[in-house]
Image (cartoon, rainbow, N blue to C red):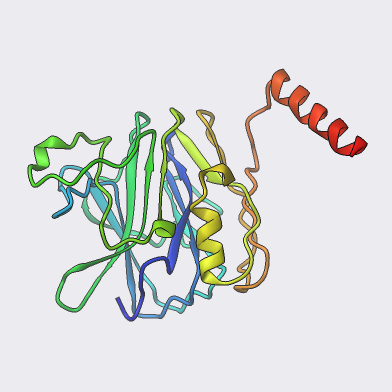
Amino acid sequence: CRGMTSGDVAVIGVKSTDPDMVALLATADLPAGATIFITDNAWTGYELKTNEGAIKLDVTSAIAAGTRFGFDAATNAALPLSDSWEKESGSLALSVSGDNVMVYCLEGDGSKQFLYAVLIQSDWYNANADSSAFSPNESALPSNLPDNCNIALNSNKRNWWYQRTVSGSKTEMLNAIADPTNWASDNVAFDLDIGPATATNSPVTNSPTNPPTPNVSSICIASLLSMVVAFL
């Protein structure tokens, strides 16, 4: 793991509508020589299942804290390093019915150090030594992950993205990202507005470049809120 620990990488976007995408944020400097893995295999509480897929990124040059990067299956994707991932095993294919995304690295003894975990369209399941108890849409939560290094986004939506500006320390960033109220979702595909790499204390904002069109009720609610604020 080259010194990487839980939360050094956070998930800030998951798109299961083809082409799949997993957007990441480095909350700490990631060292050259490290290897980062992404899998949609379920964690049973004891091991990762092997019925889905995993990909890996060899970090050839250090990635600065505040950098957004990740995997995007789209051709000519704008997400940095999206074309640098290699197949590790199986086939990474996020289910539109819900799936988990685990980000991890390997210690010298081969054990997994989980960095971040996301589950969409469900809540975390209890650990079970019987791997057949988990469907492809279910997963337990790795016990080594702190509360601010995982999130369960359980509304029935295919695509999720973190939509708030992040600045401050690693802990402050992780706390904001782990708050479900700071995420937006839709069944419509989206592309994150990926800007240049930013330093740890600079704002990092995710804005879909083709966000879903808000419905009339949403517009009315927003207008009413604006009116209330104006009269306060």
Q: Residue furthest right?
A: 231
What residue do we see at 16% from left, 42% from top? 51
Image quarter where the C terminus lies is top right
Q: In this rendering, would 180 be left or right of 51?
A: right
Question: Quick check: 117 left or right of 11?
Answer: left
Q: Residue at x 22, y 75 (%)?
A: 107
Horizontal placement of 87 versus 198: left or right?
left
| Above or below 214: residue 27 | below
Q: Residue lying furthest left in this view?
A: 130
Q: Farthest residue toward the top?
A: 216
x, y percent for residue 67: 55, 67
Q: Position of residue 40 (x, y in %)?
A: 28, 46
Frontmost residue, 34 versus 97: 97
Q: Quadrant of residue 7?
A: bottom left
Q: Examine the rendering and report whether any part of residue 94 can be seen.
A: no
Which quadrant holds residue 156? top left
* Residue 125 shows in the view: yes
* Number of numbered discs overlaid on the protein picture: 0
Residue beneath the point at 35% across and 29% down: 97
Q: Residue at 57% of width from left, 72% of height from top? A: 169
Residue 153, above or below 157: below
The quadrant of the image that shows the N terminus is: bottom left
The front one of 57 and 213 is: 213
* Vertical relation: 192 (above or below) 225: below
